Image (tube, grey):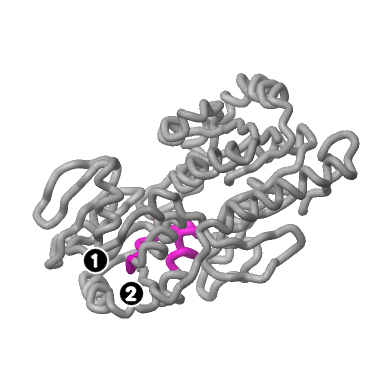
């Protein structure tokens, strides 16, 4: 099959996943065309010769996620698609796609519907569409993220939804799966070292000041800063990251889905510091505290971290009992592609367009 795979370049979780899934699809005999945006995503996926598009980046101010800052940051999307949208659409059409996969990338969703091909949505954000609003959560923020997720992935034929919790199917053609773990993570041999790994997608000076007051060594990965400041060691992304991850005794970081998944697989207790007003991160932070696999707070204090470090044996005991299947997403995707191909052969003489989408 010819598969167009749209990868969100906001953050690197979907990108790391694509680094696993594109070769997986190619080994199964599929041809894959990758669409993505953002310099880091384009560089990471360079060996697949991705087509550059423009996509949505999140904007933040001192209070956290900002709708105004996000709108301002994404203004370049408009002229790009006015000038280049038709060219990209022709390029994709010439590829003669059979199926589209969107990893939270809206232009791919639009192309799938425009060309009348089935669409597989594959992300963790769609889990929020099937959950009630958590107690105390802002109704506006919760409904906004549900609406945004619907817009990005609307009308998909199948939804592959990654979740830390085992859930019954919420609707037809909705498949909850364990998070996928990269093979380079699966190959690690974790140990309980003496340092704490800190991973921040945005600078957090207040957190750094708290860390300086603690009798721990912190190895911090944030915007490729390098250097030392007392008990803080700053490192840039590179080969050292996997070594530091495997040997850390705990993780402190923003609550992105992928790193939490890696921490669970490696049995590393996690203290989450969710980005403010970013509901997905708030949801992941709530999972850490409710599951007993870690703790979380937007405004971290020394006392909170001291209690967290004192309870590391308890978190490790719970992590040892937690089970996930790191290959379940690949297995589910392979099965769905096989079923879509079968339906196309049997019941859709004009292609796969006879498959109805999930509304």
Quarter that holds the N terminus: top right
Few, some or many C-alpha atoms within 10 Å of disc 2 (few <14, some 14-19, many ≥20)? many
Q: Is residue 87 left or right of residue 278?
A: right
Which residues fall within the magenta stretch?
268-285
Q: Which residue is mark 1?
A: 192
In this picture, is 94 found above or below 120? above
- Could you tell me which secondary element the residue under label 1 belongs to? loop
Q: Is residue 290 left or right of residue 156?
A: left
Q: Is residue 343 left or right of residue 235?
A: right
Q: Nearer the viewer, residue 338 or 297?
A: 338
Q: Position of residue 182 (x, y in %)?
A: 44, 50
Q: Could you tell me which residue is drawn at 42 percent across and 35 percent down?
A: 44
Q: Which residue is mark 2?
A: 316
Q: Is residue 210 visible?
A: no
In 3D space, how far apart are the residues under numbered discs 1 and 2 (Cα atoms)?
Answer: 10 Å
Q: Earlier in the sequence, mark 1 or mark 2?
A: 1
Find residue 110 and report its image quarter: top right
Q: Position of residue 74 (x, y in %)?
A: 51, 35
- Could you tell me which secondary element the residue under label 2 belongs to? helix
């Amino acid at each position: 099959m010819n598969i167009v795979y749209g990868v969100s370049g906001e953050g690197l979780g979907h990108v790391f996943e694509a680094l696993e899934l594109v070769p997986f699809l190619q080994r199964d005999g599929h041809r894959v065309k990758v669409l993505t945006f953002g310099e880091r995503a384009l560089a990471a996926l360079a060996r697949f010769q991705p087509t550059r598009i423009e996509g949505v980046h999140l904007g933040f101010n001192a209070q956290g996620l900002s709708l105004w800052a996000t709108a301002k940051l994404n203004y370049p999307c408009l002229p790009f698609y006015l000038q280049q949208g038709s060219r990209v659409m022709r390029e994709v059409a010439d590829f003669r796609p059979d199926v589209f996969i969107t990893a939270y990338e809206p232009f791919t969703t639009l192309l799938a519907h425009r060309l009348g091909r089935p669409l597989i949505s594959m992300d963790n954000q769609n889990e929020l569409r099937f959950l009630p609003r958590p107690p105390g959560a802002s109704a506006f923020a919760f409904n906004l993220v549900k609406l945004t997720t619907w817009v990005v992935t609307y009308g998909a034929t199948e939804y592959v939804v990654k979740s830390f919790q085992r859930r019954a199917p919420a609707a037809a053609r909705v498949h909850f799966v364990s998070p996928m773990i990269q093979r380079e993570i699966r190959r690690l041999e974790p140990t309980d070292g003496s340092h704490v790994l800190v991973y921040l997608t945005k600078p957090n000076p207040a957190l750094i000041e708290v860390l300086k007051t603690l009798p721990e060594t912190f190895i911090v990965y944030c915007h490729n800063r390098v250097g030392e400041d007392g008990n803080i060691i700053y490192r840039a992304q590179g080969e050292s990251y996997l070594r530091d991850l495997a040997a850390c005794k705990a993780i402190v970081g923003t609550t992105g889905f992928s790193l939490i998944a890696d921490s669970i697989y490696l049995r590393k207790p996690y203290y989450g510091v969710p980005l403010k007003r970013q509901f997905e991160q708030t949801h992941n932070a709530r999972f850490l505290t409710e599951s007993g696999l870690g703790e979380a707070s937007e405004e971290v204090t020394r006392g909170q971290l001291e209690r967290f470090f004192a309870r590391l044996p308890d978190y490790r005991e719970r992590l040892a009992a937690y089970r996930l299947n790191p290959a379940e997403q690949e297995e589910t995707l392979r099965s769905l592609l096989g079923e879509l191909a079968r339906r196309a052969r049997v019941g859709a003489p004009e292609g796969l367009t006879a498959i109805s989408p999930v509304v």
